[in-house]
Every structure is written in structure tokens, then in C-alpha cells.
Amino acid sequence: NAGVTQTPKFRILKIGQSMTLQCTQDMNHNYMYWYRQDPGMGLKLIYYSVGAGITDKGEVPNGYNVSRSTTEDFPLRLELAAPSQTSVYFCASSPRGEKLFFGSGTQLSVL
Amino acid sequence: LAKTTQPVSMDSYEGQEVNITCSHNNIATNDYITWYQQFPSQGPRFIIQGYKTKVTNEVASLFIPADRKSSTLSLPRVSLSDTAVYYCLVGGYLDTDKLIFGTGTRLQVFP
């Protein structure tokens, strides 16, 4: 059972570079989420989606973009990476928004 | 979405029962209460969910008073492997499209 799969697991970016964090789930969940977690802190919601073609901003959307063309995939795009975006990024999915299933995370450093 | 308040940290010893309380004074009628556990370098993991009274599973119990303005996660006979951060979330089925984590409670279990 794959569940929620995130790639890559680690990445180092230079300031100003761009990248896409991949997230895919095989549970046919409608709801998907992107969170970031800074060291020693709680999770902050970046973007979420309630179904294919529908996305909305969370608490900290600036500097990020998302798309949801299929039920399975919910990629997170970082444009013009900044040191403040150094964090661990978690993707999650949920059948109805009531119980989250998380991926193993992507550790991103922007230097 | 109901805001939650939890203690920042708690200490315990192996074999003891640990109770972590979460306050959610503005919980809505259709909101459920969900607890997650997070180990370092991992995504949060679902522990237990409830609506009212008491819920028990193989891992924990969840106590919810009649007014539902608080809830208590009870971990029986903790072990070193229960050292983690515990998050309380409040939200409803279907009509909840945002799930925002608080700062959580950092539980440290000593031998």
C-alpha cells in the first residue's frame, strides 16, 4: 500500500531557482493538502484542494503555486526560491476532509 | 474553524498514564475532534477521532465532556516510543476544507 508518496525526499536549491515538489496518492481521495513545517514548529497550511481542478490558499501561500489536474496528483511549485522557504514540506490526502494521511515529507534547503 | 489550545510540553515516565488536554471553546455543532502523533522527520499519524463522550481504540482513549469545549487524549502506560508531538484538530466532515494545526504538545517519556 503506497498511500501518499512525495518526491524528492531531499533537495538543495540556490536562491532564485525554481522547483516542483511532487505528491501523488493512490487512495482515490478527493482532498489534498500541502503543509510546511519549520524546525521545532507546528505545521502551516500552504494550499489545499477539494477535488481535481479546485485549489485554494491556506495560511502561507505566498511564493508557492499548485495545480490539481487529476485526483491522484497535487504538485507544489516554488518560484524564485528564498531562504525563508527552507523547511520540511508534507503532502496529505483525505477522503472527506476528516482524517489526514501524510506522506513522508520533502526536506528543502535554500542556500 | 475552531481554534485549539494545548500545553506546549509534558514529561512522563514509562508505564504511567498520560493525559493531554486540548481546549476548543468555539467548537461548532458538526465539528469532530481528531488527534495526531508526529515523530521527528515523519509526517503526522492519525491516532483517534471522536464527536462526544468517550472513544477508545488499541492506541488511546479520547474523552469529550458534554459541552465539547475541551477534549483529553489519554495514553495508557506510555513507553519511550510514545515520545512525540501530539496535535489536536477540530473540524467537520464534508464541509471542512481546511485543517490547520496548532503548535501541538511535545511529550517526553523518560525511562
Image (cartoon, helix red, strand yellow):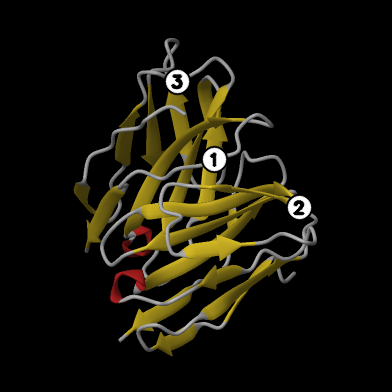
Nearer to us: label 3 or label 2:
2
Q: Gap between marks 1 and 2, in whole Å?
A: 17 Å
Which amino acid type corresponds to the residue marked 3 in the rendered image?
Answer: Ile
Question: Do we see residue B35 in this rendering?
Answer: yes
Where residue A84 sits, quadrant-wise, is: bottom left
Residue B96 placement (x, y as % from top left): 60, 33
Where residue A97 sits, quadrant-wise, is: top right
Counting labels gives 3
The subunit letter for the residue under badge 3 reads B
In the foreground, A110 or A25: A110
Identify the residue shown where x is 49% and y is 64%: A64
Tag shown at residue B64: none
Identify the residue shown where x is 41% and y is 39%: B88
Question: Do we see residue B76 in this rendering?
Answer: no
In the foreground, B87 or A17: A17
Q: Gap between marks 3 and 2, in whole Å?
A: 30 Å
Q: Left of B93 or right of it: where is A41?
A: left
The subunit letter for the residue under badge 1 reads B
The subunit letter for the residue under badge 2 reads A
The residue beneath circle 2 is: A53
Looking at the rendered structure, whether the residues under marks 1 and 3 are on a common chain is answered as yes
Give the class, few, some or many, for how many residues have Cα within 10 Å of label 2's Cα (few <14, many ≥20).
Answer: few
Q: Left of A21 or right of it: where is A39?
A: left
Identify the residue shown where x is 37% and y is 64%: B81
The residue beneath circle 3 is: B27
Identify the residue shown where x is 55% and y is 63%: A65
Which amino acid type corresponds to the residue marked 2 in the rendered image?
Answer: Gly
